[in-house]
Image: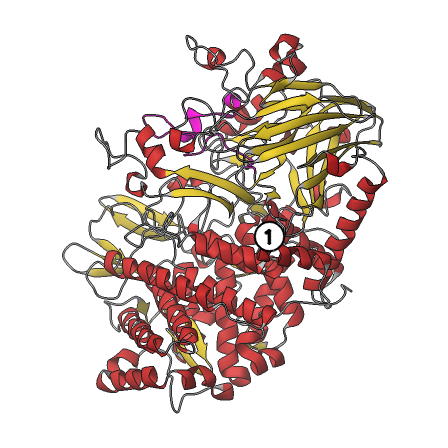
Amino acid sequence: MATNEQNRLDEARTGTAPWKKWGPYLSERQWGTVREDYSENGDAWNFFTHDQARSRAYRWGEDGIAGISDDKQRLCFGLALWNGKDAILKERIFGLTNSEGNHGEDVKEYYFYLDSTPTHSYMKYLYKYPQAAFPYGDLVETNRHRNRNEMEYELLDTGVFNDNRYFDVFVEYAKGEAEDILVRITAANRGPDAADLHLLPTLWFRNDWSKWIAASNRAPEKPNLKQIEAPAGATAVAAAHPQLGAFVLSCEGNVPLLFTENETNHEKLFPGQQNESPYVKDGINDCVVQGRQEAVNPGKQGTKVAAHYTVNVGAGQSTVIRLRLSSSFLDQKGQPFGKNFDKVFGDRLREADEFYESVTPPSVSKDAANVMRQAIAGMLWSKQFFFFDGDNWLDEHHSNPLHHGYRHARNSEWFHMLNEDVVSMPDKWEYPWYAAWDLAFHTLPLSIVDPDFAKEQMTLMLRGSYLHPNGQMPAYEWNFSDVNPPVHAFATLFLHRTEQALRGEVDVDFLKSTFNKLLLNFTWWVNRKDRFGKNVFEGGFLGLDNIGVFDRSAPLPTGGHLEQADGTAWMALFSQNMLELAVELAGYDSNYQEMVFKFAEHFYYIAAAMNRPGTDGMWDEEDGFYYDLLRLPDGSATRLKVRSMVGLLPLCATTVTEKWQRDRIPMALKHVQERLRRVPELSATMHPTGEGHLGVADRGILALVNPDRLRRILTKMLDENEFLSPYGIRALSKFHDRHPYVFHVNGQAHVVDYLPAESNTGMFGGNSNWRGPIWMPVNALLIRALLNFYSYYGDNFKIECPTGSGKLMNLFEVAKEISDRLTRIFLRDESGRRPVYGGTTKFQEDAHWRDHILFYEYFHGDNGAGLGASHQTGWTGLVAKMIQLFGMLDAEKLLEAAKSAAFARGTSEVK
């Protein structure tokens, strides 16, 4: 039986009701982004700073605490706070810029995405606000003076939370209807004494009317907010926007309304320039903090308004304020805060519980179910409206190649882009911009709760307003031309299987459209990243930042170029995924059999090139491992013998073929067999396949690695002294802790050693590290590969796990063991501690902290502590899929159902 939340999803999909029109689409940080950077030198962090953000109107988006907006971010709502001691209102989340942090940019606040349904019919957010003055200066100065080998200086370290002198501020949303949004804000004083708090729920319009905005993006008229008459016991604001329409914000109680304009305070920031209005963006701040009543509009209208609640909260007590944002004042029947208000909240929370129970397998523990739900909630809260008009932006930078006065600058080649969509972000503070390969991984856990949104995200990067005319996908706003791993075909196939399992149908139009766009992207890779047409690929850093000996996206100090084991393995996987998509489509159009043959050929060519024997190949027979190959200008080559994820990724290029799939493509099979008969070298070094080499249930296999190489690589991968951590697979072998890899060039030593925590170099900004920590997305791909191998081998292939333990496991058991170790990062251990929080006592022991989960970017290679971006639920949210998958799947089911086994929804109650 469908839950009420599932019914809302169905209504959203069919267009019956716009349940997703309103959601958490504000950024956590708009300042310091590339879109807001108009500097001469491209220094985004310093062109638009946190300190300027309260006074300076944004051009391309908005940010706010626990914020929501419509899906074009025209009308925004968020919460501002003041403890009576800070020098400024707390209107947005604070953190260090890349140059201020000793490990790059870093958020310095504590906030949690506690809950959300996929239609945002219920959402809950927690912000922890100190009662003492927020230590902005201390955080900046102390971190600035620490080096890369020192620990980061965190907000807890400042002592501002001592004696629990802080407020837990919970912000909850519940939808009465699609455009009737109820808001409940609860401030809980965790300290020993009563304390004052100013709560300023704020409504404002994104500035789309100012004269400095291009006509193509300017609203036809300026929107307006104004105070209107309200029922007894309430205060109300009418909002009118020429494109959005009319809304009413009702505030419980007779509360003062402070109005100003969302326009830049030019006179403060840029002396000599005049303000467009006497009331500017920081007017509410100046009124509340400085007592300047003249800073807000006495006429009670503008484009930004805050309801000013002042409360005194007793020790251990809470206070609640209630608001309601609705498209129709009359719909509230004059009683916006009657008994029905609390009933709606109760209903939506109950429905959220029912929905999550429907997708959580019954075998999952209560703690794991909590982790799974918060992981998905974090992903749903990480949706953000992303606005970028490439033609307009480049014009404003005098960098548009279509126009006169052109000068080359960042992203000049991307003038075709027009992005104005809700996009799943990696981290709305640290990475408030989409990243192409992150997004592909996001779709896997998102598909648990909202396969429609997951599909929409998958197709975004392939739209003509994103995908470059030459077929390249945009990487991220710092450099759209950078190269990310080509994992979108893999994600497309995953979403296709998910939809088949959930709905028993195939969206052929989605498959065809996506396949054709991916074909353009595949062609771009073949033409641009296979330098000499040898079927070995480059690609630069390929998302793995500092994993290499050199910066793989920069000219090499030796000259020459890299033949990359990971780039080539990614392309082998891309070929396999495209082949399998073509097989699906061949069931509806036999012409796609030709594409099956095309991608089978590509895979064989890549496999033969990558597995080339001798000193000129990536495979090292002595070490039993794959390495990048440094090709020098004279044509000679040397292997860069770093034992890293680069050498494990060839395992991932593994696909199992079912008998029904082969029966669907007789012509393609015939062509492939004839090609291999004529050119047997193509299959000599890869995994045997075809007649005489079929596995369980007559399954075939396409794999880069043959059985011997599979065993040798796994022996290293499952060695706890190498890759296998108690918390997953490390990105770099611990072997390099004892044996750093050193490569000498022109008298300089380039060293790669095992760094289980933060990076000790500034490569790629220094804010991420692939030289030892655990990263969720590549672990997920390795698990997928192991499950594929198991569905082929069954119990006919076993290996020691861990290496040297004497304990033999089949590959399903190995996959589950890795998944369990990854999940263990977030779960309470026997002593009640969560490894993700390391040695931070507050998070480990305090009842108001310990069950609120943060999903970090990566994790310490030895102890599992969270590192990097603290809210990168994006791909770390993959843990939700792992919990769900192994909660409903066992080895027997996988062997029986194979491709469909991993895509059903979990059901029943949590135990």
Determine which quarter of the picture holds residue 501: bottom right
Tell me which residue sits at (51%, 87%) in the image. 697
- Residue 390 rendering spot, x and y as whole percentages: 35, 38
Tell me which segment is drawn in magenta: 26-52
**Is any atom of residue 80 visible in this view?**
no
Examine the residues drawn in magenta and state their main secondary structure: loop
Q: Nearer the viewer, residue 128 or 343?
A: 343
Q: Nearer the viewer, residue 699 or 448?
A: 448
**Is any atom of residue 691 visible in this view?**
yes
Element under disc 1: loop
Q: Is residue 42 above or below residue 655?
A: above
Residue highlighted by disc 1: 863
- Residue 60 rendering spot, x and y as whole percentages: 46, 33
Tell me which residue sits at (85%, 26%) in the image. 314
Q: Nearer the viewer, residue 718 or 391?
A: 391
Quarter in which the C terminus is drawn? bottom right
Q: Is residue 356 above or below residue 502?
A: above
Please say whether residue 43 is one of the residues in the magenta stretch: yes
Assess disc 1: are there few (<14), some (14-19) or many (≥20) residues with their C-alpha within 10 Å of its C-alpha.
Answer: some
